[in-house]
Image (tube, rainbow, N blue to C red):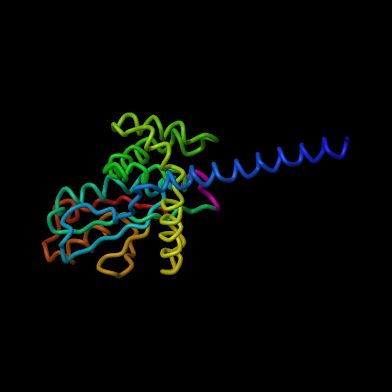
Amino acid sequence: MKDHFWKIVGLIALVAIIGSVVYSQQVKSKANEGVVIEDHVKGNPDASVVLVEYSDFQCPACAQFEPYVEDIMAKYGDQIRFEYRHFPLLNIHPNAVPAAQAAEAAAQQGKFWEMHDKLFANQTTWSTSPTPIRFFEQYAEEIGLDMDQFKLQLNSSVITNAIRDSFNEARGLGLSSTPSFFLNDEKMTYETFDDFNTAIEKALGVAPSADTEAGTEVEFGI
């Protein structure tokens, strides 16, 4: 009788485990439905001058640099193709990958840049939180995302794999810090925004801007 009882208990447990695995696979499959990973591009997609940034949403230097990238794009956006790529520094920024996942989930609804801007503008709010997702969901609501879709696709393995691929690409290029920039496939070196701005203006073949001539001594730690 006891043996029969334990056989029934074992069978119930087995069915529960199988059911849990099947459900988990169904959730993962649903999270990947319709997910398409695309390059995140601003400016002129056909421009001959290509600026690529490898960045980490939790990186303070990346947030500090962001307004200067925006300034460059405001002045020369019609002549530059700017691409954002993920390089989350996992050993020092534990919330960087969830933030990248939030940006990619927003991208599925055409709002990568809106989430990108929210993440950097509010970096000090979520960067040290043990539960950053609640902030990301708040930002998703603020930019008008379908919340059910956003929450589901946060768990997409397609998105996670894309972030991992971008990270591995950066490491393959020898990168170890953020932000790191490439201008027409050449890694940029700079100590101030003037250096950064001058290199881009040289690539564009334009005269140095008034700000550069005056000397904008803004240094960036990376």
Quadrant of residue 12 within the rendered picture: top right
Q: Any magenta on residue 51?
A: no
Image quarter of the N terminus: top right
Is residue 173 in sight in this rendering?
yes
Is residue 60 in sight in this rendering?
no
Task: Report the residue at 83% width, 38% height from top.
Answer: 4
> Left of 178 or right of it: where is 4?
right
Task: Report the residue at 28% width, 57% height from top.
Answer: 83
Rendering coords of residue 196 (x, y %) = 27, 59
Q: Any magenta on residue 92?
A: yes
Rendering coords of residue 127 (x, y %) = 47, 39
Image quarter of the C terminus: bottom left
Residue 147 versus residue 71 in the image, above or below: above
> Left of 195 or right of it: where is 133?
right
Q: Nearer the viewer, residue 20 or 107?
A: 20
Quadrant of residue 30 within the rendered picture: top left
Rendering coords of residue 118 (x, y %) = 33, 37
Q: Nearer the viewer, residue 3 or 217?
A: 3
Task: Report the residue at 17% width, 61% height from top.
Answer: 201
Residue 212 versus residue 1 in the image, above or below: below
Q: Nearer the viewer, residue 78 or 1?
A: 1
Quadrant of residue 213 within the rendered picture: bottom left
Secondary structure mostly taken by the magenta-highlighted segment of the chain: loop
Rendering coords of residue 172 (x, y %) = 44, 69
Count all numbered tags in the image, as a single digit. Answer: 0
Task: Report the residue at 16% width, 48% height from top.
Answer: 74
> Left of 76 or right of it: where is 59?
right
Q: Which residues are magenta?
A: 91-96
Q: Nearer the viewer, residue 100 or 14?
A: 14
